[in-house]
Image: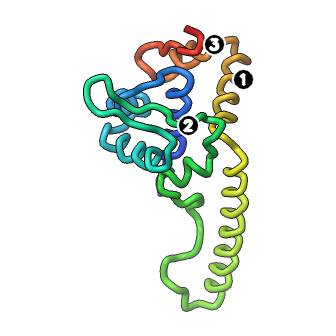
Amino acid sequence: MPRDLRMSRILHVLIHLDRHVPLATSDEISRMISTNPVVVRRMMAGLRDRGIVASEKGHGGGWQLARSLADVTLRDVYEAVGAPPLFNIGSGAEPAECLVERAVDARLDTSLREAEARLLEQFTRVTVEDVARDFERDAADRGLGSECAESISHHEEPIVNHRQA
């Protein structure tokens, strides 16, 4: 089962909207995270439905933050992208006939539910602002400004840090 990248991609986008590009079209975001604009609109719609972002249609429109990153938790983002499975291990879809397999499945299911509950609790304590500060600390440790750190990653053009401009 391939990894679900929606949450990490959306976190990436939210930090850019806050730190670098306060308004971005679906096309611009799609280039930023290497996906299709239709996929971007679908992912961003979940954020819009929860009041995290807002969108303006038409010329000069695009996506922008509607709330501070300090007011958005990882749990908020996780739920906005559809609460994808957190683990890709577990029991089979069909009830097992073998008693050994049933015991294994029961223990795995219980352990995974407990681990998921703990992880989701942790997600409620971490804000997107916390993640953005992690990025800024990493950039500073490398001797880069946030706009320099971004320009050496995967974008075609350097992105200006509008907070510093």
Is tag 1's residue or tag 2's residue first in the polypeptide sequence? 2
Label ID, residue 67: 2
Determine which residue is flagged by label 3.
145
Q: Name the residue: 69% across, 30% down.
A: 134
Image position of 60 (left or right of 154): left
Assign a secondary structure to mark 1.
helix
Determine which residue is flagged by label 1.
137
Q: Name the residue: 33% across, 28% down.
A: 61
Q: Amino acid at mark 2?
A: Arg
Furthest-top residue in this view? 165
Is tag 3's residue or tag 2's residue first in the polypeptide sequence? 2
Q: Amino acid at mark 1?
A: Arg
The front one of 12 and 143 is 12
> Number of labelled discs?
3
Q: Name the residue: 60% across, 34% down.
A: 68
Structural distance between the alpha carbons of marks 3 and 2? 24 Å
